């Protein structure tokens, strides 16, 4: 059982603490939070051990789970890695690509394993259809959230859109060719609404929209590929798969048949992939434990987290 400690006991940090404490793959040693009042409150309310410094926590564990504000990810991860500890880093991996690349070099040097918390990779709606996504040529995403002060220290691209950037990069096997974007600041010092068009070298185009001042929550992605349309609702955890195939010579009464101007007939049919109920955060933490125990590649590597950040920065720089 891996000894684990959590850096940061805010909203998400408390969720990580709870799940690590429940997991059979970890032994929760404790946490560190620089805000003394919050640390005392969490320790008293949940009984988790509060450490007096980052170094004390690092010394006591095998795995450091970094759930601090983005601006501190680099310093926390660097200290943990240099002490020979495995690191799980919440998204985005760091503030800058340069910082992320330093961490990649460090984990190689110290022979430890790192994973980035792109939790939507573990969303059951996505995992149910990811193997059916082949060479998509147009992708459209909408990630809208009601206003919440958490996360407003960074642009909406790093707060919300980066989830969709990572998902897209995981299914499009091609390099980014160009990025065109626009963003608007409404309540924050950085953009609260953003739209980006990403063009890939293979011809795929992705159109992404993110907002953190919406009146409703929405997290939908649509993948269009030859003879198939795949929709993933990350919020409702639902999927829709619509396929087309050559129409049979003698279609049934209830078969849906389309005919184009050239007379070519196609049959439309629907698939309903089974969606397994899961806790995505617990899954990402436990698959990280598996990667450490088996010395295998984690599902979301530091390199992948860095590429998502690189594209996010390209978008921000185009505002």
Image (cartoon, rainbow, N blue to C red):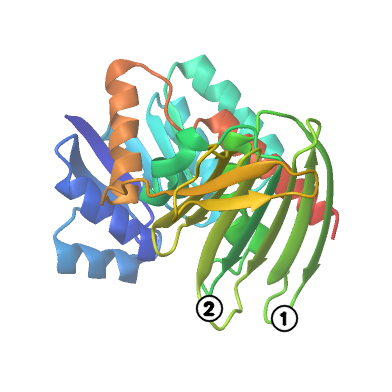
Question: Which residue lies at the image location 40% right of the left edge and 41% below the top edge?
Answer: 127
Question: Which residue lies at the image location 37% right of the left edge and 60% below the top edge?
Answer: 12
In the rendered view, would you say 49 is above or below 62?
below
Question: Which residue lies at the image location 80% right of the left edge and 49% below the top edge?
Answer: 261
For label 2, the crowd category at 10 Å Cα-Cα, with few meaning under 14, some 14 to 19 and many 20 or more, is: few
Name the side, left or right, on which 307 lies relative to 9.
right
Give the label on residue 186, or none. Answer: 1
Residues at marks 1 and 2, CA–CA distance in whole angstroms: 13 Å
Indicate the position of residue 114 as horizontal and vertical percent values. 45, 30
Corner quadrant of residue 93:
top right
Element marked by disc 2: loop
Indicate the position of residue 178 as horizontal and vertical percent values. 85, 42
Mark toward the start of the polypeptide (1 vs 2): 2
Indicate the position of residue 278 as horizontal and vertical percent values. 27, 50
Question: Which residue lies at the image location 55% right of the left edge and 37% below the top edge?
Answer: 249
For label 1, the crowd category at 10 Å Cα-Cα, with few meaning under 14, some 14 to 19 and many 20 or more, is: few
In the rendered view, would you say 64 is above or below 71?
above
Give the label on residue 32, or none. Answer: none
Along the viewing direction, whichever of 299 and 253 lies nearer the viewer: 253
Quarter of the image with the C terminus is bottom right
């Amino acid at each position: 059982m891996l000894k684990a400690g959590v850096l940061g006991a805010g909203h998400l940090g408390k969720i990580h603490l709870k799940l690590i404490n429940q997991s059979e793959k970890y032994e929760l040693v404790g946490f560190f939070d620089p805000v003394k009042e919050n640390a005392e409150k969490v320790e008293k309310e949940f009984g988790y051990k509060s450490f007096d410094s980052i170094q004390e926590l690092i010394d006591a564990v095998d795995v450091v789970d970094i759930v601090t504000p983005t601006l501190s990810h680099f310093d926390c991860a660097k200290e943990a890695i240099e002490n020979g500890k495995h690191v799980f880093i919440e998204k985005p991996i760091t503030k800058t690509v340069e910082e992320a690349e330093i961490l990649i070099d460090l984990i190689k040097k110290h022979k430890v394993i790192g994973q980035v918390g792109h939790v939507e990779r573990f969303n059951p709606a996505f995992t149910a259809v990811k193997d059916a996504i082949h060479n998509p040529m147009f992708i459209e995403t909408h990630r809208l959230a009601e206003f919440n002060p958490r996360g407003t220290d960074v642009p909406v691209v790093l707060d919300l859109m980066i989830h969709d950037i990572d998902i897209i990069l995981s299914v499009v096997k091609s390099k980014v060719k160009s990025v065109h974007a626009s963003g608007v600041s409404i309540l924050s010092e950085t953009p609260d609404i953003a739209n980006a068009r990403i063009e890939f070298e293979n011809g795929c185009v992705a159109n992404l929209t993110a907002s953190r001042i919406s009146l409703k929550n929405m997290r939908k992605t649509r993948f269009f590929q030859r003879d198939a349309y795949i929709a993933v609702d990350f919020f409702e955890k639902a999927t829709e798969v619509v396929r087309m195939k050559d129409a049979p010579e003698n279609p049934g009464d209830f078969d849906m048949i389309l005919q184009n101007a050239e007379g070519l007939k196609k049959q439309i049919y629907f698939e309903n992939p089974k969606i397994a109920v899961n806790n995505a955060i617990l899954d990402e933490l436990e698959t990280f434990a598996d990667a450490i125990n088996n010395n295998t590649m984690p599902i979301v590597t530091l390199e992948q987290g860095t590429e998502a950040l690189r594209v996010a920065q390209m978008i921000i720089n185009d505002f």
